[in-house]
Amino acid sequence: AVFGGYGMEDAAQIAYLCLYALQHRGQEASGIVTSDRGRIYEHRDFGLVGKVYNREILAGLKGNMAIGHNRYSTMGLSTAANIQPLLVDCKVGHIAVAHNGNLVNAVELRRRMEADGSIFRSTTDSEVILHLIARSRAGTSDEMIADGLRQVEGAFSLVFLTKDKIIAA
């Protein structure tokens, strides 16, 4: 399950409630990434939504925008590195992604990028998307995301978060 919300007071609390309502879509792990238009905040852990977050954790996830994810493994091992949203720092700053679906050309793309020197942290096809974005020669995060997505094949729903916007695909 993926969630994205923009321009909300208490974005983390709303993300939590939405992920709680979507718990049936994934019960392995949950994560939320927020932005206050300056900093990025994140929390991810194994377990059901009600166990992953508490008031203290949600209070620390500051900002008026959030993306969230409940994990149900279809690709990749059950490891902490695979809990989404995945967050990277690249030439345009931080980009986080929450992904639901499957990329049918992920293995081929990953092998090609590894041969070119890319280093992967997770075993998910979601990280392939982030590498494609980071490697893009486009100048803005919007253009980089569009460039990366033109290279993937499959069925998916994605929400991206940068320090000042949310993009859905």
Image (cartoon, rainbow, N blue to C red):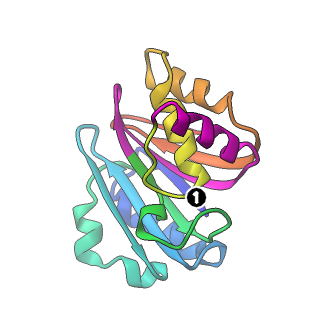
Residue marked by disc 1: 2
Tell me residue 36's x, y (percent).
27, 44
Residue under the point 31% across and 79% down = 54
- Seen in the image, is 44 located left or right of residue 123? left
Q: Which residues are magenta?
A: 88-117
Residue 73 included in the magenta stretch of the image: no
Residue under the point 28% across and 38% down = 37
- Indicate the quadrant containing the N terminus: top left, top right, bottom left or bottom right: bottom right
Tell me residue 118's x, y (percent).
46, 37
Residue under the point 40% across and 44% down = 7
Please identify the quarter of the rendering in which residue 32 is found: bottom left
**Which amino acid lies under the numbered mark 1 shown in the image of this protein?**
Val
Crowding around mark 1 (Cα neighbors within 10 Å: few <14, some 14 to 19, many 20+) is: many
Front one among 61 and 107: 107
Q: Secondary structure at mark 1?
A: strand
Front one among 55 and 95: 95
Front one among 138 and 120: 120
